[in-house]
């Protein structure tokens, strides 16, 4: 019969505990190493999707205004209409002059420009705040005036 000393059992028990702890640390490290890049990729994709939606909304807003301006160019003064236009967040500049409607929008990678051309001379000012704008489009004879009710 072989006798095992208590010191030997204690040493084996401590080595087993150390091995379990090391395996636990390796597993947790592996999970963290996989999780962090996955979270960063998801965050990046989420931001790009959000700005894609913002650019689409800006394009829709400019298109709606351009269509109304083209329609009003066929009418005489003092014809006017009011339309509701949804402006997204991050619109930094709205320029309405000559024969174009121009919006500058802040995006994930900098700024993007949305431009729509119209058939007639157009002028006006619009605010850049996000939300619904009530836009007045008014025929002035030789040009069309665009404004909103701030």
Image: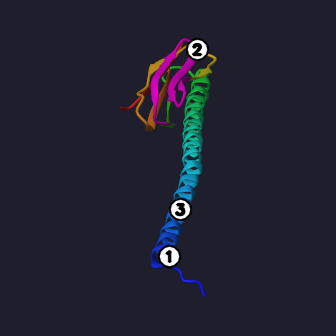
Of the numbered discs 2 and 3, the one sitting upstream in the chain is: 3
Neighbourhood count class around disc 1 (C-alpha, 10 Å): few under 14, some 14–19, many 20 upward: few
* Secondary structure of the residue carrying numbered label 1: helix
Q: Is residue 91 magenta?
A: yes
- In this rendering, which labeled residue sits more in front, label 1 or label 3? 1
Along the line of sight, which residue is nearer the eye, 60 or 109? Answer: 109
At x 38%, y 32%, the residue is 149
Majority SS type along the magenta span: strand
Instruction: Residue under label 2, please give it.
Output: 99
Instruction: Residue under label 1, please give it.
Output: 9
Neighbourhood count class around disc 2 (C-alpha, 10 Å): few under 14, some 14–19, many 20 upward: some
Neighbourhood count class around disc 3 (C-alpha, 10 Å): few under 14, some 14–19, many 20 upward: few
Q: Quadrant of the C terminus?
A: top left
Q: CA distance from mark 1 to mark 3?
A: 23 Å
Give coordinates of residue 92: x percent, y percent. Answer: 44, 25
Question: CB atoms at circles 2 and 3 under 8 Å apart?
Answer: no
At x 54%, y 27%, the residue is 109
* Secondary structure of the residue carrying numbered label 2: loop
Of the numbered discs 1 and 3, the one sitting upstream in the chain is: 1
Give coordinates of residue 146: x percent, y percent. Answer: 47, 23
- Residue 79 visible, this orientation: no
| Residue ranking furthest to the front | 1
| Residue ranking furthest to the left | 150
Along the line of sight, which residue is nearer the eye, 105 or 86? Answer: 105
Q: Quadrant of the N terminus?
A: bottom right
Instruction: Residue under label 3, please give it.
Output: 24
- Judge whether 25 appears above or below 75 on screen: below
129 relative position to 27: left or right = left
Q: Which residues are magenta?
A: 87-112
36 relative position to 131: left or right = right
């Amino acid at each position: 019969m072989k006798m095992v000393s208590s010191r030997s059992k204690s040493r084996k028990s401590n080595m087993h505990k150390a091995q379990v702890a090391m395996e636990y640390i390796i597993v947790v490290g592996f999970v963290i190493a996989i999780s962090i890049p996955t979270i960063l990729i998801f965050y990046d994709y989420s931001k790009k999707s959000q700005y894609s939606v913002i650019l689409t909304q800006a394009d829709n807003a400019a298109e709606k205004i351009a269509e109304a301006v083209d329609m009003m160019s066929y009418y005489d003064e003092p014809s006017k209409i009011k339309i509701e236009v949804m402006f997204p967040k991050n619109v930094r500049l709205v320029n309405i002059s000559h024969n174009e409607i121009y919006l500058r929008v802040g995006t994930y990678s900098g700024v993007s420009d949305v431009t729509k051309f119209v058939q007639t001379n157009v002028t006006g000012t619009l605010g850049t705040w996000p939300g619904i704008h009530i836009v007045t489009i008014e025929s002035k004879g030789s040009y069309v005036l665009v404004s909103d009710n701030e």
